[in-house]
């Protein structure tokens, strides 16, 4: 997020005139969301100082879905209806992402985001019995569980990002993210390049996933928005995962880790490392799938989530097949 003009004046060397930074434009619901997946299930909710975009569908025990960095509710376009046959599905756009307003920069930290999502749940009147997140969304859910903000019976990690990046990558990626997030021109440049033929397609291929062109188009729409890009960069630059990694052994909900074997963003071996840290955790590796496995094979992922919900007592046992 670009700092508020009133708190972030830029003085030129030759004059005392104040030059203010204008906010990066965000996706517009009427223009960019006119054909958004499950638009009829969308609503806007005011809480924690933000206007949130939230989708809700189905009946039954509440499952909360949190997307990852740079995505939005479109990420659940195929999975959510499958889960809605068993659950009340609640899926918000994270702060600054998609059609949810962008908070002050300091509210983009992992801890603050978890607090603001807890406020959203209170406003909605939901206490989820099951939670599922993709990538960075898993870290938010784990933080909420560890802080006692939610107490689900189970947590599903879809290619979850809960461990600090190690080695050389960890030493240069965080400083680079901070540098990019601090430069007001970067989001606008990224948004401009996103309009280049094939750029968003290459970004998705680099995650190890293959998506239908319709799915690619939703990502393109988001990446073409400087406000959305700025929020994603600020989120990456603000997060510290060392503390949450240290606390993972104290995670109370049952943990199911689903990972794509071809994930080029977060190696599937990270899921196995987390499983070793969390008592009772279980890992399922999905062969040939990438970082967006839940978008590539939503039917299979839904089956795993429903099975896990039955194991945790969130759903009743499946009826035995007739002899």
Image (spheres, rainbow, N blue to C red):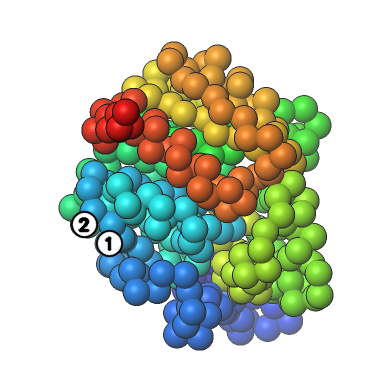
> Looking at the figure, which quarter contains the N terminus?
bottom right
Q: Mark number for residue 47? A: 1
Q: Residue at x 72, y 28 (%)?
A: 166
Query: Disc count in the image?
Result: 2
Where residue 280 appears, as percent x and y from the top left, is 43, 15
Q: Residue at x 31, y 61 (%)?
A: 56
Tell me the distance, in whole angstroms, between the alpha carbons under discs 2 and 1: 7 Å
> Looking at the figure, which quarter contains the C terminus?
top left
Where residue 190 appears, as percent x and y from the top left, is 73, 68
Q: Is residue 235 left or right of residue 41?
A: right
Kindly identify which residue carries mark 2: 123
Which one is earlier in the sequence, the residue at label 2 or at label 1?
A: 1
Where residue 171 appears, as percent x and y from the top left, is 75, 34
- Give the answer, above or below, for where 317 lies relative to 64: above
Q: Residue at x 56, y 28 (%)?
A: 284
Q: Please state which of residues 168 and 217 is positioned toward the viewer in this rendering.
A: 217
Q: Residue at x 81, y 75 (%)?
A: 197
Q: Nearer the viewer, mark 2 or mark 1?
A: 2
For the residues bearing labels 2 and 1, Cβ distance under 8 angstroms: yes
Give the crowd class for mark 1: few <14, some 14-19, many >=20 residues within 10 Å. Answer: some
Callout 1 secondary element: strand
Q: Is residue 249 left or right of residue 198?
A: left
Where residue 79 appears, as percent x and y from the top left, is 47, 53
Picture quadrant where residue 153 is located? top left
- Residue 293: tell me if it is visible: yes
Q: Is residue 150 left or right of residue 176?
A: left
């Amino acid at each position: 997020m670009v700092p508020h003009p009133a708190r972030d004046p830029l003085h030129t060397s030759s004059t005392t005139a104040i030059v203010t930074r204008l906010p990066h434009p965000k996706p517009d619901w009427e223009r960019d969301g006119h054909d958004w997946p499950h638009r009829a299930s969308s609503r806007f909710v005011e809480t924690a100082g933000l206007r949130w975009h939230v989708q809700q569908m189905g009946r039954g025990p509440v499952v909360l879905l949190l997307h990852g960095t740079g995505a939005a509710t479109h990420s659940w376009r195929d999975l959510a209806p499958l889960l809605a046959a068993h659950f009340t599905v609640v899926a918000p756009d994270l702060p600054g992402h998609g059609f949810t307003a962008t908070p002050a920069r300091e509210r983009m930290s992992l801890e603050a985001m978890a607090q603001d999502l807890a406020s959203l749940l209170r406003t909605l009147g939901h206490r989820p019995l099951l939670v599922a997140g993709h990538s960075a969304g898993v870290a938010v859910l784990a933080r909420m569980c560890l802080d006692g903000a939610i107490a689900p019976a189970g947590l599903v990690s879809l290619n979850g990002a809960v461990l600090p990046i190690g080695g050389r990558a960890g030493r240069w990626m965080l400083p680079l993210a901070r540098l990019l997030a601090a430069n007001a021109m970067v989001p606008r440049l990224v948004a401009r390049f996103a309009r280049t033929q094939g750029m968003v397609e290459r970004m998705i291929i680099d995650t190890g996933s293959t998506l239908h062109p319709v799915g690619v188009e939703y990502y393109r729409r988001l990446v073409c928005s400087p406000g959305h890009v700025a929020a994603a960069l600020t989120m990456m630059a603000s997060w510290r995962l060392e503390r949450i990694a240290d606390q993972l052994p104290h995670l109370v909900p049952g943990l199911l880790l689903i990972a794509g074997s071809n994930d080029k963003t977060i190696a599937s071996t990270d899921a196995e490392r987390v499983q070793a840290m969390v008592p009772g955790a279980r890992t399922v590796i999905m062969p040939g799938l990438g970082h967006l496995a839940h978008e590539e094979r939503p039917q299979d992922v839904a089956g795993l989530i429903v099975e896990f919900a039955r194991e945790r007592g969130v759903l009743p046992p499946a009826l035995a097949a007739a002899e």
